[in-house]
Image (tube, helix red, strand yellow):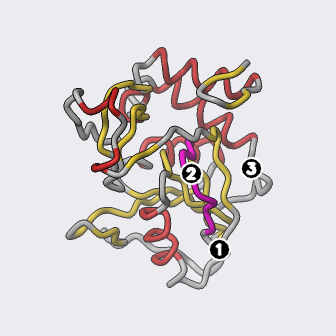
Amino acid sequence: MLFFGFFMDARDKEVITIFEETNALLKGHFILRSGLRSEYFFQCAQVCQYLDKVSRLAELLIEKLVYKKIDLVVAPAMGGLVIGQEVARQLGARFIFLEKVNDRLALRRNFLIHPQNRVLLVEDVVTKGGRVMEAIQIIDQHPCDFLGAVSLVDRSTEPLNFGIPFTSLLKMNFPTYQADQVPKHLQNIPATKPGS
């Protein structure tokens, strides 16, 4: 099946269905966290209202992991919180989160990353990877076994190189545009920034 210009397997179809059923896949004119514009937006907060759906997405994401022994799951706030916590629950791992301080991620609340921890970073949606890179820099300050990063959706248009293994549950390359290069069919639609 062809969807948004790419072929989907059964797992992709299930994930898209979950996003559509929960109104998490939006169509309109959106301003992404990166500042780019898009006609499509994954508002993962919508799917997070339905914990049965979150559990299924986490299960599907875990099936894609090549490493199963994970002691600690780390997620950046806000987007990665719910999916990160559910991934940790299903893996029987400890969960901590990074939060924004002056619009930068920080490790706070006396959370610790121990040297023996096998760490997985979990995010919801990646477009350019800015928050993932911030999170990696924080985790790299600790002498742990940093296994890799995962996300529900990878909507990047350029290859991502985080310096660690990265995988996503769903890869979708929706076109993105600079604010001054928005196509005509979007120019008359007010741009909104719905947040993830």
Magenta segment: does it hold 153?
A: yes
**Helix, strand or loop for disc 2:** loop
Q: Which residue is drawn at 28% across and 50% down?
A: 180
Q: How far apart are marks 2 and 1 (CA)?
A: 18 Å
| Residue 70 image point, x, y percent | 68, 59
Whether residue 149 is situated above or below residue 184 in the rendered picture: below
- Amino acid type of the residue tagged 2 in the rendering: Thr
Q: What secondary structure is marked by label 3?
A: loop
Task: Look at the picture and state if 88 lies above or below 60.
Answer: below
Task: State the residue position of label 3.
Answer: 65
What are the residue bounds of the magenta stretch? 152-161
Graded by Cα atoms within 10 Å as few (under 14), some (14 to 19) or many (20 or more), the crowding at tag 1 reads few
Q: Kindly identify which residue carries mark 2.
A: 157
Quarter of the image containing the C terminus? Answer: top left
- In the rendered image, the quadrant that contains the N terminus is top right
Instruction: Name the residue nearer the viewer: 82 or 7.
Output: 7
Q: Residue at x 44, y 26 (%)?
A: 25
Residue 163's disc is: 1
* Label located before the other in sequence (2 or 3): 3
Type of amino acid at the residue the image marks with label 1: Gly
Are the residues at dot 2 and dot 1 in contact (C-beta closer than 8 Å)? no
Q: Residues within 10 Å of mark 3 (few under 14, many from 20)?
A: some
